[in-house]
Amino acid sequence: MGFAILWIMLFHLPVPTDLAFLDFFKALGYGGVDIFLFLSGFGLYFSMSRKNFSLKKYYKSRFFRIIPEFWLIICIVFLTQMNFSLKSFIFLFCRATTLSYWMKLQEELWFIPCIIFLYIIFPVYFKLFKKYGTKVSLYFVCAGLSLILIYALTCIYYYNNKNFGGFIIFTYARIPIFFIGAYFGHLAKDGSNIALSKKLKTIGLVSAIIALIILQCFMIYFPRELHTCSLAYLPYIVITPTLCIILAMFFEKWKVLDKIFTVMGLLSLELYLCHVYIYKLFFVFIDYLDKDSSNILIMLISFVAAYTLFFINRKIFTRRTNIRIRP
C-alpha cells in the first residue's frame, strides 16, 4: 500500500521529472489504484471470515475509517474557496454524499465513492461465494471485463472516442481486480497451497510483461482510446497480482524499506485525500521554483498534512467510537 500511494502521488505530480525512465513510470502511476483495490479485496475476505464477524461492525468501522476524514477535507476545501452561494452548498452536499460522482459531476477524490460502493456490495459477494464457491468470483470478474469492453467499443465506434461515462469508468473498470484480490484472499485464508512453483512464476511474469508491452503499445499508438475508452485499465488486471507478489518478495528481503513503506501504507488514505488538493494549490507557485524542488516540496507538505489528518482522526474518533483506526 505504501508503494501504491507513492506511485499515485508520482502520477499526479503537476510537472515532469525530466528523467525518461521515471517519467515513464510516472505515466503508469494510475496502476497504484489497482494495487489498492487488489489488497482491499484480499483484506476484506480475511475480515469477513472471522468467527466473530458482525455486519454492523463491518460497516461502522469502514464508515469511521473513511467518511470523517473525507468530510473534513472537502469542508476545508469548501471554506478556502470562499464561495458560499446556494449552488456551492448543493454541490458540497452532493460531494459529501458521493452523489457528485454518480451524477458525473467533477470529482477529484473519485476513489472514495468507488471504494465505498465496493465495500457496500462485498458482503453480498462474500455470501454468494460461501454458498456457490469459486464460480462466483469468475462471474464477478467476467461481469467487470464485459462492462469495460462494452464501454470501450461503444465509445470507439459510436461516440467518437468520447468519455461519456465520466469518472464512473474508474469504478467498473476496477471491478475485476477487486474480486481477483478477494479470490487471492480466499486462497490464503483457507490454507490453500499457493507456494509459487517455477512454472507458475514464469507464467505470471511472462503474462505481466506481455500486458506491460500491450499497455506501452496503447500509449504510443492509441493514446486517445487509452484515456477515454477504458483500455488503460485492462493490462493491470494481469499486471497487478504479479506486481504485488514481486513487491511482497522484495520487502520480505529488505526489512528497512519494509518498515518505511509500512508507515507510508498506514497513511495511504490520508495521503490520497491531501495530496490532490495540495498539488493543485501548489501549482500556482511552481514558476518560482525549479522542477525538482517543487516536486520534493509538495511531496513533503503532503506527508505533513496526511499525518496531521491521521492524528486528528485517531484522537477524536478512536476515543469516541472505540473503533481502531486501520488502513
Image: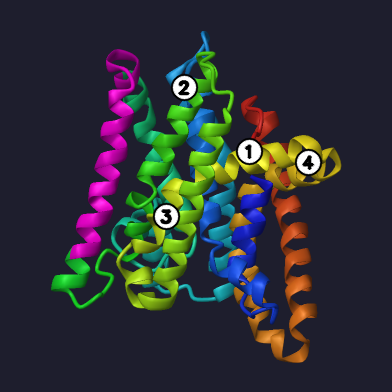
Mark whose residue sits in front, 4 or 3: 3
Residue 235 has which mark?
Answer: 3
If you read the primary sequence from the N terminus, does the residue marked by circle 4 or circle 2 appear first? 2
- Tell me the CA gap for discs 1 and 3: 26 Å
Mark whose residue sits in front, 2 or 1: 2
- Tell me the CA gap for discs 2 and 1: 20 Å
**Secondary structure at numbered mark 3:** loop
**Dot 1 amino acid type:** Pro
Q: Which residue is mark 2?
A: 186
Label 3 with label 2: CB-CB less than 8 Å: no
Q: Residues within 10 Å of mark 3 (few under 14, many from 20)?
A: many
Residue 85 location in percent, x, y? 42, 74
| Range of magenta residues | 128-153
Q: Which residue is mark 4?
A: 258
Mark whose residue sits in front, 3 or 2: 3
- Tell me the CA gap for discs 4 and 2: 24 Å
Residue 243 has which mark?
Answer: none
If you read the primary sequence from the N terminus, does the residue marked by circle 3 or circle 2 appear first? 2
Above or below for 126 versus 254:
above
- Toward the bottom, the furthest residue is 287
Above or below for 204 versus 168:
above
Which quadrant of the structure image shows residue 161?
bottom left
The secondary structure that most of the magenta stretch takes on is: helix
